[in-house]
Amino acid sequence: LIAKTMKRRFQLDTERLFLSLKKGLPLRYGENPHQKGWIYINEDERDTFLRTIKKLWGKELSYNNILDAYSAWKLLVELNSPACVIVKHNNPCGVAEGKTILEAYKKALEGDPISAFGGIVALSEEVNPELAFELNNIFLEIVMSPSFPDEVLSILKKKKNRRLLIIPLKKGREKLEFRWIDGDFLVEEEDSAILEKETIRIVSGELTKELLEELVFAYKVVKHVRSNAIVVTKDKGTLGIGAGQMNRLQAVKIALENAGKKAEGAVLASDRFFPFTDSVELAHQYGIKAIIQPGGSVRDEEVIKKTRELNIAMVVTGIRHFRH
């Protein structure tokens, strides 16, 4: 959403933002059946997500379908291909990179197969027949991919209550994000911060190249989880995700409990600093090998000292990733 006078350049310091929306397709309903819903098209934009996706099969998209599909796509384009993202209720519940697209899907599904039921799957590569049969083993609202060959479509269309979408894989441009507040708007730049080697600080332990890559992967995922957010990963696949909790320790508990025994030797990412050492102590009980977090707590030194005592590597990024 931008002003015509801004010539497609996003600036927060402009005096006026003009919004020009054209009524598009009506939705079956809004977030709930008793709410009406529509799509409105921004006349000042062209290559938006809604105008670049293509539905190949299935019922019309719902309000919630669009929210979840967009969330899945935003995370997918940040990952290294082959990659898979599974989203449920606007939160990732399974994310993975793999040597093949089939491996990426299986790893993502294994991260939380219960939550994946009725979810949305976004894939970074063309769906092949072997993957198509795997996708048919579970109920999925939407399967998104850059390509579906005809032989694959014939397999996937056996599931009538499923939508198939072709999606672009290019990263979206930097945008402004708007929140409606009783007739007014909150406006902010999109969270497009990227981890740089210069900003990462290793404050505890030693990191191999592979372990640092794992931490970066986990931090990409936690950026897209509702705060307070914790993500546990191993071998570029999520094992447990704690989302939308009012206190960080509870988010840590949920993520680690979901990971279970698989957390041994895994890494943990937090979207915000740890206010106390309790989260680190709990991570140690589950065998977490390394932690990545933004830092910034008045108790940072206490937390770092605890990781050293427990032989847990820790990386501080200086970049917080709240998502509300």
Image (cartoon, grey):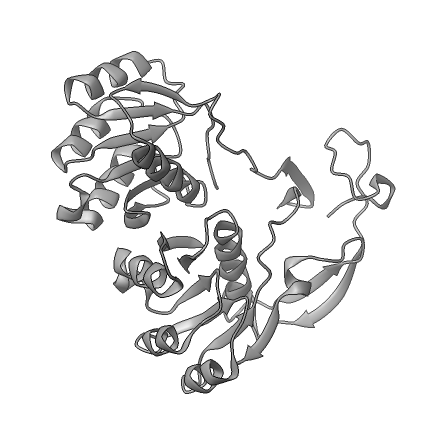
Question: Does 274 sit left or right of 160 as displayed?
Answer: left
Instruction: In the rendered view, tell whether residue 91 sits above or below residue 312.
Output: below
**Image position, residue 228 (x, y; %):** 37, 38
Tell how many labels: 0
- Identify which residue is drawn at 47% across, 84% down: 151
**Image position, residue 55 (x, y; %):** 59, 75
**Image position, residue 303 (x, y; %):** 26, 18
- Identify which residue is drawn at 45% across, 85% down: 157
Question: Does 268 sit left or right of 142 as displayed?
Answer: left
Instruction: In the rendered view, tell whether residue 55 sits above or below residue 108.
Output: below
Q: Would residue 130 be seen by someone viewing this image from the given angle? A: yes
Instruction: In the rendered view, tell whether residue 90 sits above or below residue 322.
Output: below
- Identify which residue is drawn at 46% across, 25% down: 197
Q: Would residue 31 be seen by someone viewing this image from the given angle? A: no
In the image, 129 versus 278, the foreground residue is 129
Question: Does 308 sit left or right of 174 as displayed?
Answer: left
In the image, 313 versus 140, the foreground residue is 313
**Image position, residue 144 (x, y; %):** 50, 67
- Identify which residue is drawn at 20% across, 17% down: 308
In which image quadrant can residue 14 be found?
top right
In the image, 23 versus 153, the foreground residue is 153
